[in-house]
Amino acid sequence: MPANSSAIADRMAAALTPMDQGSVVSEVAERLLGLFTSGGIAPGTRLPAERQLAASLSVGRSAVREALAALEILGVVVVRPGSGTYLRDGVSELLPKTLSWGLMLGEPRTRELVELRSGLEIQAVELASTRVTDEALNRMRHNLETMSKNLDNYSAFVEADALFHREIADCAGNAVLGELLQSIRSLLRIWVDRALADEDHAETALQEHTAILQALESGNPATATEAMRSHMVTASRRLLAGFDTSGKFEAPPTDD
C-alpha cells in the first residue's frame, strides 16, 4: 500500500474506536459518515480496504461492506470497480440532507418511514394509471420477466423490483414525489434486500407486481391503487419483520 494510503488508514483507525458487537449496519454507516464529514479526510481520498475498517471498528467485514453500500446510495462515497472506494467531492454539502434522512436508519422512526413509503407508492400509481405510456408498460413487463426468472436470485429479483417501482414513479409525472420515493427506497435498501427470505416470498411479490401491471394496463386508477395498496401491506410486513418487540431492528449478522 502506498505511503499516503497507509497514513490515511492510520488516521482513520485512530478516529474510529471499536464498536460494541451488537451494533447494527446503520450505526457503522453513521460512524463513517461522521468521520467523512468532519473535514479530516480530504474529498477524493481512496478509503482503506474493508478489512482495515472492520478491524478499526471491531466488526465483521460484511457490516462495513453494507454500510459503505448505503453511503454510496446516499452519494457520500463512490465505488470505482478495480480501484476502490473514494470519498466523494462536496460531501459537506450533502450533510444536512444525509443526516436528516440517514439517522432514521436505525431508529424506531424507520417504521414511520416505511408507512410513508407505502402512501407515496399508492399516490404514485394512482397518478401513473392515467399517464403511463406503452413504452413504460413494456419496460415494466421486462422487469416482471426478470423477476420471474430470478425467484432464487434475490439480488437480481430486488433490482428488477426497484426498477419496476421507479418506472411507476417516473410515469406519475411528479418530480418531487419521485425524489422523495427514491430517497426513501435508498435508505431502506439494506432492509429491502433482507426482506426476501425464500422463494415463496419472491413468488408472492411477483404475483402482486403482476396485478399492479394489469391494473395499469387497464387504465383504472381505483384498480391500480387497490393493487398497490395490497402489495404495500405485505411488502411492509416483510420489511418490518426485522423489528423486535421494542420497535428497533434486530442487528443483522456482521460476521463473514
Image: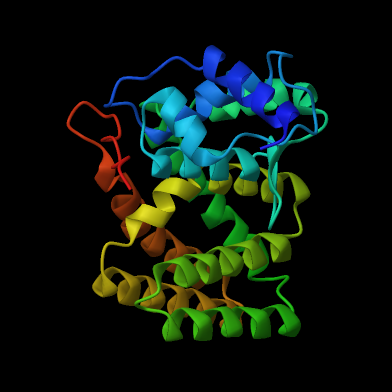
Q: Up-down: is 159 above or below 16?
A: below
Image spot of residue 131 (x, y percent): 73, 70
Q: Give left or right: position of 59 versus 40.
A: left
Q: Quadrant of residue 244?
A: top left
Task: Residue at 66%, 67% (x, y): give it.
Answer: 167
Q: Residue at x 66, y 85 (%)?
A: 138
In this view, the residue in front, 173 or 69, is 69
Q: Say if residue 126 shows up in the picture.
A: yes
* Residue 126 coordinates in the image, percent (x, y): 59, 62
| Residue visible at 63% across and 45% down in the picture | 73
Near-viewer residue (34 or 51) = 51
Q: Nearer the viewer, residue 148 or 7?
A: 7
Quadrant (top left, top right, bottom left, bottom right) of the N terminus = top right
Vertical relation: 100 (above or below) 185: above
Q: Position of residue 122 (x, y in %)?
A: 52, 56
Asked if residue 115 can be seen in this view, the reply is no
Q: Residue furthest left?
A: 245
- Image coordinates for residue 157, horizontal then vertical, percent: 46, 71
Please give the name of the residue rendered at 63% of the width and 65% of the height, measured from the top-left corner.
168
Count of marks, rendered view: 0
Rendering quarter of residue 164: bottom right
